[in-house]
Image (cartoon, rainbow, N blue to C red):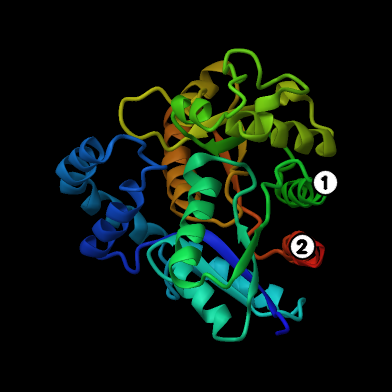
Amino acid sequence: MPTRKGILLVNLGSPKSTDVQDVKEYLDEFLMDERVIDYRWFFRSLLVQGIILRTRPPKSAEAYKTVWTPEGSPLIVITKQIQTKLQKLVDVPVEIGMRYAEPSIENGIRSLTEQGVTDIVLFPLYPQYAMSTTETVVEKAEEVRKKFFPGVRINYVQPFYNRDIYIDCLAESIREKLPENYDALQFSYHGVPERHIYKTDPTKTCNLNDCCSRDTNPSHQFCYRHQCFKTTESVIERLNIPKEKTIVTFQSRLGNDKWIEPYTDETLKNLPKKGIKNLAIVCPAFVSDCLETLEEISVEGKEEFMHAGGENFHYIPCLNDEDRWIEVVKTLCEERLEDFFLV
């Protein structure tokens, strides 16, 4: 029987509305993922359902309201725009799925199989590898495939943080949006607990104190922190910006555990004291603007920086549906489509 190929783009997900109950349902699914909060089920449930979901949903709902568009969640809207543009460039069906909420990964795979697809290239839309992003997408997709679609084959697009086509694309996007006068360019990546870095390292060679900056180390292919620094290093090389004019930080902490440092919010409060009054900031852990970029950085982050004495705060948007980024998505997907011929 002939096979037919298709593409599934997978992003994080979003509540279906800014209603508090919808936000609560979304946070429940998200935070109860053992690869996001990696406690044993009992303690995870106690923390999430016993504490966080009793207090956080109303505040999160208000935050979502500040970024919501007439079409809905910016993350979902942008992912659909990427799908539409990519579909015009490839001759195989393209669908989307979200790791949490709708449209789900299951529905995305089902939509492809209903079109006769048996071989799927699944693209987790995360440049760097992390347990709470790439790994949980792959694990969920495999769970769904085995349960509902055992005849389907899936090839996964690997993290692309160090691919030249991606770095060139990101650097050009930043170059076009960078203000003429700025004191520093800050790269703010999503944070993860330090223990996640060690848990995802099968080589057991990672040491957050000294190995991220090494040229080579067996753990680098699994180390989110290293991959963030490598992305930054490669981009500033393309932009020809002095390293001392750039900053790498990590945002979005949850709870009291030790997360990878330095922290974005604390850095923003301290920069004006160091004479950095004109700041440009970009978030390369995300390819699509979302709550963490549009509200946490461009609203809350700006307030923190300006309140501390900053003068100009310039947020540089994600790649979103830029044509050059769609070409990168096309190339990375087509590479994995070709791999089916090698099986």
Q: Which mark is residue 343?
A: 2
Q: Which mark is residue 185?
A: none
Decide if residue 337 is in sight here: yes
Q: Which residue is mark 1?
A: 164
Q: Position of residue 309 (x, y in %)?
A: 48, 27
Q: Nearer the viewer, residue 178 or 92?
A: 92
Establish if 41 lies above or below 138.
above
Q: Toward which corner of the image does residue 231 lie, by quadrant?
A: top right
The secondary structure type at the circle numbered 1 is helix
Is there any visible trace of residue 183 in the rendered image? no
Tell me where residue 307 appears, x and y as whole percent.
42, 31
In-front residue for pair 207/141: 141
Residue at (81% x, 51% y) in the render: 165
Q: Which of the pair 134/262 is nearer the observer?
A: 134
Count neighbours of disc 1 (C-alpha within 10 A) and say few if under 14, some if 14 to 19, many if 20 or more. few
Say which quadrant the C terminus sits in: bottom right
Which quadrant is the N terminus positioned in?
A: bottom right
Q: CA distance from mark 2 to mark 1?
A: 26 Å
Residue furthest to the front: 1
Location of residue 87 with respect to 100 vertically, above or below: below
Which residue occupies 52% across, 70% down?
150
